[in-house]
Amino acid sequence: MNKLRMTALMMALGLGLSACASVDTATRNAPMDQLTTEMAAPAPSFSLVGFDVNVPLTLKVSEANSYYPGGDIVWRGDPFGNRYEQVGALFEDAIKLGGAPLNGAMPVVVEIEVHRFHALTEKTRYSVGGIHSIEFTMTIRDPQTGAVVRGPREIKADLVGYGGSKALQAEARGLTQKYRITQHLAKVVRDEMSLATGWVAPENGVTARVVPLTPVKPI
């Protein structure tokens, strides 16, 4: 009796494995264009007609000249002043630089809300260097209806910040913190507006090299 039960069990197990193998084989043998069609998403076709940048006053600004001060906003790329307005203006320039050249079929408005903008202090920049830590939410809307057409998406767009002699050499070539961060964020905005995947951060999460985009006139 035990032998009969064992035989039945082995037969059932064999049928189950055979069924699984059939399904797996069918998937592996599916035409490549079919799989590509199912998996790939179309790239968006957007045209920038407006934007809105919000830098909440609830974010804490730090002017401490230490290696890693607390606070949500740490910015030394402009003279001492209203850091909320300065950060907002930088994002606006990045949106125009990244989005204005696009000439897609759908007019859209880009909205950005800043959560963190932690660049390097003087002490850090002229010694060890570090990471420009930048986090924000980006939403793309229909300008007529206000309907969301992409997002809202939480984006972490960290960038390597030069330090020491490298920072001095970069500044001598015009590659200031402000220039590098603006160009970097412009690339992030453009990817979000033009690629099916949107912005994709490097594997380690930090961008090291900035590829400048062609400047454009304000919209």
Image (spheres, grey):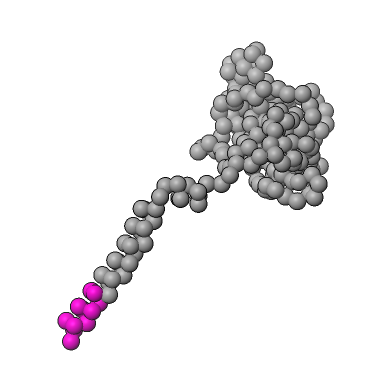
Identity of the residue drawn at 66% across and 39% down: 45
* In front of the other: 52 or 29: 29
The answer to which quarter of the image holds residue 1 is bottom left
Q: Residue furthest bottom?
A: 1
Q: Is residue 29 magenta?
A: no
Q: Residue furthest top?
A: 172
- Apparent side of residue 33 relative to residue 166 in the rendered image (left or right): left
The answer to which quarter of the image holds residue 174 is top right
Identity of the residue drawn at 23% across and 79% down: 8
Q: How many marks?
A: 0
Residue 97 visible in the current orientation: yes
Residue 112 coordinates in the image, percent (x, y): 73, 41
- Apparent side of residue 22 relative to residue 218 in the rendered image (left or right): left
Residue 185 coordinates in the image, percent (x, y): 66, 32
* In front of the other: 51 or 104: 104
Residue 211 coordinates in the image, percent (x, y): 59, 25
Quadrant in the picture for the C terminus: top right
The rendered magenta stretch, by its main secondary structure, is classed as helix
- Apparent side of residue 181 relative to residue 81 in the rendered image (left or right): left
142 is higher (above) or lower (below) than 167: below
Residue 118 visible in the current orientation: no
Identity of the residue drawn at 73% across and 24% down: 216
Identity of the residue drawn at 68% across and 36% down: 104
Residue 5 coordinates in the image, percent (x, y): 22, 82
Q: Please provide the residue range marked out in magenta.
A: 1-11
